[in-house]
């Protein structure tokens, strides 16, 4: 890593372990999972046993008590697996959904659910987006009302990653109507078991990419949730949601960079062995320069991401930097995808080449977890324009 | 049952080895170092024996530079209980016999019931250690084992070693030396908890004097490493398959004298 050493010996040991797992237990099955449109449930307890599903959680809940950079290593190695779907499914479970419980849940809730989450026995999804609004979180319409010892929720949720298989859904709902001044007011997070009366999966969504990761539309009809499953303080959930969004966006950046690393390696390997006009493609200046540009772009994305990782790890305010990471790496990944497919020529357009899947998978990055347009708005706001 | 596993840190299998500026050694810049893969089978088997018996201790040992501690930590992360690091200027240019003497001395001190080696280190491929150490200790030795079962009373081991087309089965009294062949098991990767816990485990530094050994001059000295001559380019035999195969067979028989 040159002059600046990011990862220590333990991080590198963990990297080697994740890489072995990916080589032996993921890589041989990626095509099969993509075709089936799901990742087998059996891999989750396996990842749990290896410590992938509770990296930063305290040992008393079954976690490993490691730091954020250890999570970064996991993201990078899963990103390199050529299965964007697996990277995303794991990322949602470990860094987008369960942190709501870990950072805002009561002691009793944590003791009840976290060990099974860390073991990969209970899988998690985060349900914020609704059919009528994604980026505009404050416009949430799912309503919750308190009735005695429980809450009753009504509404629906859209584009929910892990929505089909998840046992635990972290659902954002509104306890009171917001007003024009404070649109965020009244939004809270609830931990909902899939067996809850009134919970249903409306349909499994058919996607352009990330096809092995299941995505669902959910419906809540007078869904009953125990009062103690409210996370954090009533009506103040929005701020906690936004804080964990920062983590989610950083994870997306780490995935984008590492997926691009692998795509570029695959493209270079292809360009070396593909001959045209009497020599390998890597001998053609137009291709060499394109590859040099892509390597430079990815390196810039990597260090922008690492810089934000450092701030996040040190618990510094990093909304602007993390939004820049999300914006830059998502746009970068799509440019890398375009050029890598181009270099592959006709083969790049064929399903049998991993680069074709990569190009479909990364299309999500400028949309999911906050669109590029929203990122620019956040950055502009942080710049006090 | 106490099991001692001597291991060696070697360049990663994917390394493109280059001869160093000093031609007695390789250029180590940019090399990723790993536990020699055969040694991983030995560590795994030792852990399985301990787990199966429900008790015991697995001790990893290496002789090498400060950097070799990383390899010991990998073994601790896999589940070894503690480690010994043999490091002393006296062993700087040690040959296999010097290393074997050091290992034999540490084995005498530790008095394990079983010593499990990898069949050879994948860097210099000498494969001398298991036999040399067993000889120095006067212990029986079975090399390249594909399976083993320790008797319930812990007094002997039934080991199968690979021979052409068959398994050679031995009943060996303990203590003894075994060396692991590929296929003995599938080594585990360390869990994150194992990695986090490894730093709390002991790596004890052992000097030559601690073993009552003085520097003994190496009897085997590397004079120089020489690169192999570059491989001549392949030959493409053109023509129809039926004709081309005839020419291929003739060429293998007469030019290459391979058949």
Image (tube, grey):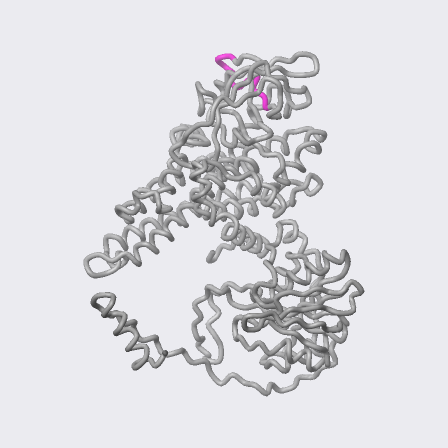
| Res A278 seen here | yes
* Image quadrant in which the N terminus of chain B is located: bottom right
Is B158 positioned to the left or the right of A327 in the image?
right
For the stretch drawn in magenta, the main secondary structure is: loop
| Res B66 seen here | no
Q: Which of B155 and A305 is in front in this view?
A: B155
In the image, farthest residue toward the front = B242
In the image, farthest residue toward the left = A277
Q: Horizontal and vertical percent for residue B173?
A: 75, 73
Is A364 positioned to the left or the right of A289 in the image?
right
Residue at image position (48%, 69%) is B28
Q: Quadrant of residue B110?
A: bottom right
Total numbered circles: 0
Q: Nearer the viewer, residue A276 or B49?
A: B49
Q: Which of A98 and A42 is in front in this view?
A: A42
Q: Horizontal and vertical percent for residue B78?
A: 64, 57
Residue at image position (41%, 45%) is A301
Q: Horizontal and vertical percent for residue A8?
A: 57, 55
The image shows residue A104, relative to residue B129, as above or below, that is above
The image shows residue A47, relative to residue A363, as above or below, that is below
Tell me the magenta residue range: A179-189
Q: Quadrant of residue B170?
A: bottom right
The image shows residue A22, relative to residue A174, as above or below, that is below
The image shows residue B182, relative to residue B258, as above or below, that is above
Residue at image position (58%, 44%) is A47
Task: Tell whether position A184 is magenta.
Answer: yes
Task: Tell whether position A88 is magenta.
Answer: no
In the image, farthest residue toward the right = B153
* Image quadrant in which the C terminus of chain B is located: bottom left
Q: Horizontal and vertical percent for residue A187?
A: 56, 19
């Amino acid at each position: 890593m040159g002059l600046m050493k990011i990862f220590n010996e333990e991080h590198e040991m963990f990297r080697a372990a994740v890489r072995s797992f990916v080589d032996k237990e993921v890589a041989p099955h990626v095509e099969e999972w993509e075709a089936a449109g799901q990742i087998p449930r059996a891999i989750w307890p396996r990842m749990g046993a290896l410590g992938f599903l509770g990296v930063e959680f305290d040992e008393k809940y079954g976690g490993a008590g490691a730091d954020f950079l250890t999570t970064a290593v996991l993201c990078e190695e899963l990103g390199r697996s050529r299965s964007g779907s697996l990277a995303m499914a794991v990322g949602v479970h470990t860094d987008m959904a369960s942190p709501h419980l870990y950072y805002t849940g009561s002691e009793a809730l944590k003791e009840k659910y976290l060990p099974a989450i860390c073991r990969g026995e209970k899988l998690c999804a985060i349900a914020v987006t609704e059919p009528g609004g994604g980026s505009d979180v404050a416009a949430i319409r799912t309503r919750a009302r308190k009735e005695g010892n429980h809450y009753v929720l009504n509404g629906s949720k859209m584009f929910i990653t892990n929505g089909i298989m998840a046992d635990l859904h972290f659902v954002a709902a509104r306890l009171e109507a917001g007003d024009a001044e404070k649109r965020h007011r009244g939004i809270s997070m609830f931990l909902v078991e899939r067996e809850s009366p009134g919970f249903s999966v409306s349909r499994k969504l058919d996607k352009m990419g990330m096809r092995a990761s299941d995505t669902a539309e959910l419906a809540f009809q007078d869904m009953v949730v125990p009062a103690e499953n409210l996370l954090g303080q009533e009506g103040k959930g929005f701020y906690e949601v936004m804080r964990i969004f920062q983590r989610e966006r950083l994870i997306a950046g780490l995935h984008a960079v590492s997926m691009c690393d692998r795509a570029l390696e695959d493209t270079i390997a292809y360009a070396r062995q593909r001959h045209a006009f009497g020599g390998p493609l890597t001998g053609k200046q137009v291709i060499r320069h394109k590859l040099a540009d892509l390597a430079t772009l990815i390196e810039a994305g990597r260090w922008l991401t690492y810089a934000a990782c450092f701030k996040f790890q040190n618990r510094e305010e990093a909304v602007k930097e993390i939004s820049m990471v999300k914006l830059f790496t998502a746009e970068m990944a799509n440019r890398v995808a375009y050029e890598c497919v181009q270099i592959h020529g006709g083969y790049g357009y064929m399903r049998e080449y991993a680069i074709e899947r990569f190009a479909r998978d990364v299309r999500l990055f400028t949309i999911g977890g906050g669109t590029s347009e929203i990122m620019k708005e956040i950055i502009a706001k942080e710049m006090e324009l | 049952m106490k099991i001692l596993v001597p291991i060696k840190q070697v360049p990663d299998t994917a390394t493109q080895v280059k001869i160093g500026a000093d031609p007695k050694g390789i250029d180590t810049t940019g090399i990723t170092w790993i536990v020699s893969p055969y040694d991983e089978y030995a560590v795994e088997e030792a852990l399985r024996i301990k787990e199966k018996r429900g008790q015991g201790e697995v001790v990893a040992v290496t002789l090498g530079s400060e950097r070799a501690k990383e390899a010991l930590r990998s073994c601790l992360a896999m589940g070894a209980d503690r480690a010994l690091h043999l490091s002393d200027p006296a062993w700087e240019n040690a040959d296999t016999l010097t290393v074997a003497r050091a290992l034999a001395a540490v084995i005498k001190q530790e008095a394990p019931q079983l010593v499990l080696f990898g069949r050879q280190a994948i860097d210099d491929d000498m494969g001398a250690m298991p036999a040399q150490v067993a000889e120095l200790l006067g212990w029986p030795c079975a090399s390249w084992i594909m399976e083993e079962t320790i008797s319930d009373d812990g007094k002997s081991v039934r080991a199968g070693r690979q021979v052409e087309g068959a398994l050679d089965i031995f009943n060996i009294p303990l203590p003894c030396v075994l060396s692991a062949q590929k296929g003995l098991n599938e080594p585990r990767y360390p869990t994150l908890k194992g990695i986090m816990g490894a730093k709390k485990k002991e790596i004890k530094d052992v000097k030559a004097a601690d073993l009552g050994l003085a520097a003994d001059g190496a009897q085997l000295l590397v004079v120089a490493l020489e690169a192999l001559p570059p491989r001549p380019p392949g030959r493409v035999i053109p023509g129809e398959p039926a004709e081309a195969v005839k020419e291929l067979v003739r060429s293998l028989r007469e030019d290459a004298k391979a058949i």
